[in-house]
Amino acid sequence: MKLVTLVGGGTAGHVEPALAVGNWLMANSPDIKCDFVGTSGGVEADLLPKTNLHFHKILKAPFPRSFSVATIIWPVKFLLSVLQSLKLLNGSKLVIGFGGYVSAPVYLAARIRNIPIIIHEANAKPGWANKVGARFTDKVTIAFEGAKSLGGRWGSAKLVGMPIRSEIRAVRSLSDSQITQLKLELSSKLNLNPKSKNIFIFGGSLGAKRINDVIAASVTELIDRGYNVIHSVGRGNQLPAARFGYAPLSYIENMAQIYAISDLVIARSGAVSCAEIASVDRYALLIPLPIGNGEQEANAQDLVANGRAQICLNSAFNSEWLMSNLNSLMQSASLKRNRVLNSADLPADAMIGQMALEVLGRAN
């Protein structure tokens, strides 16, 4: 049995691709076992217990962005994380990393143990950990073309896209009649008008206050204009009152189905969200979260360049902006739905999985 160690953490953009690749490897290679390394504080702590992967937790050692007490103690925490990683990698034949601070000590430990490394970068602007890891391997894969602009290992990285759930990928193959039937079923369940167009709004698993506030101020006019609104407000946020044409939900369990019946998507531009929107071929209004190194805005630019989205900066997004631009957004969405996608492209999880099998084959 060959052990492959997956590492990533903090956000869904680092964890969900890892799970997709791990599932592909185990489904296509019965002699491969996958473990996952993360921390107790990231989204992986919620997602991994629901899988069949063995979950190892190491100390989180985020690199300080400014000088503070954390700067002084960081080297000690990072060293402890590396030591933990060295122990966990005993017997591992390959490390596949997906970013997040937890990845850096694992990359270093793999380098010390001379274990091959494959890296997948989910964002258009690579994070610190994957920049470190890219120094240790020439097996670098990316989700966005824009990452190539960094040059070096990134310039020669293999563009594979984002590993996403199979049910999301399957949306593009649904027939018009299947979508119509699904819309009838969900309209009845969510108390929506089956004859109206659907606007799907979400801000991630925890929601987005700015987006939630704007929709709260706009929902009456949206309904009056003849639209249904499906609104994921995020876990832990107060659920607004539902009404005919407006379905507020804490969390979307059936994302594929909601994507399928949506005419317009309004969302943050996290890596997973952008990849899913591109895969299901729905038009989107993207409101990048202004954090980190600007990766969300960079992620959105790829969809804009391909005619799949429009960007509105977080500072500019309000009810007045949304209502004044709604007609043009819906016109773009209507045109976008007629585009034919190349369904022959190999899914990203399979591309990374095949690269892993090649590395394992050479390692033997």
Image (tube, grey):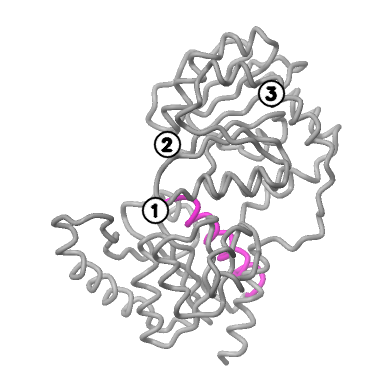
Mark 2 highlights which residue?
A: 206
Residue plotted at (61% across, 37% down): 254
Q: In this view, does 143 lie above or below 197?
A: below
Q: Give residue 210's position: percent from left, percent from top.
A: 44, 27
Is 342 on the left-hand or right-hand side of 109? right
Q: What stretch is highlighted in magenta?
A: 10-29
Mark earlier in primary sequence (2, 3): 3
Name the foreground residue: 223 vs 43: 223
Quarter of the figure that contains the C terminus: bottom right
Mark earlier in primary sequence (1, 2): 1
Q: Is residue 190 above or below residue 94?
A: above
Is 182 on the left-hand or right-hand side of 357? right
Q: Give residue 170's position: percent from left, percent from top.
A: 74, 48
Q: Which residue type carries mark 3?
A: Asn
Dot 3, crowdedness within 10 Å: few (<14), some or many (≥20)?
Answer: many
How many discs appear? 3
Residue plotted at (59% across, 83% down): 359
Mark earlier in primary sequence (1, 3): 1
Mark 1 highlights which residue?
A: 10
Is 306 on the left-hand or right-hand side of 21? right
Residue 253 disc label: none
Mark 3 highlights which residue?
A: 198
Q: Which residue type carries mark 2?
A: Leu
Please check the rendered image and state whether residue 27 is part of the magenta-colored stretch, yes or no: yes
Residue plotted at (71% across, 14% down): 193
- Whether residues under marks 1 and 2 lie with C-beta atoms below 8 angstroms apart, the answer is no
Q: In this view, does 50 lie above or below 35?
A: above
Name the foreground residue: 25 vs 337: 337
Q: Give residue 59's position: percent from left, percent from top.
A: 26, 63
Give the Cα distance between marks 1 and 2: 13 Å
Name the foreground residue: 144 vs 282: 144
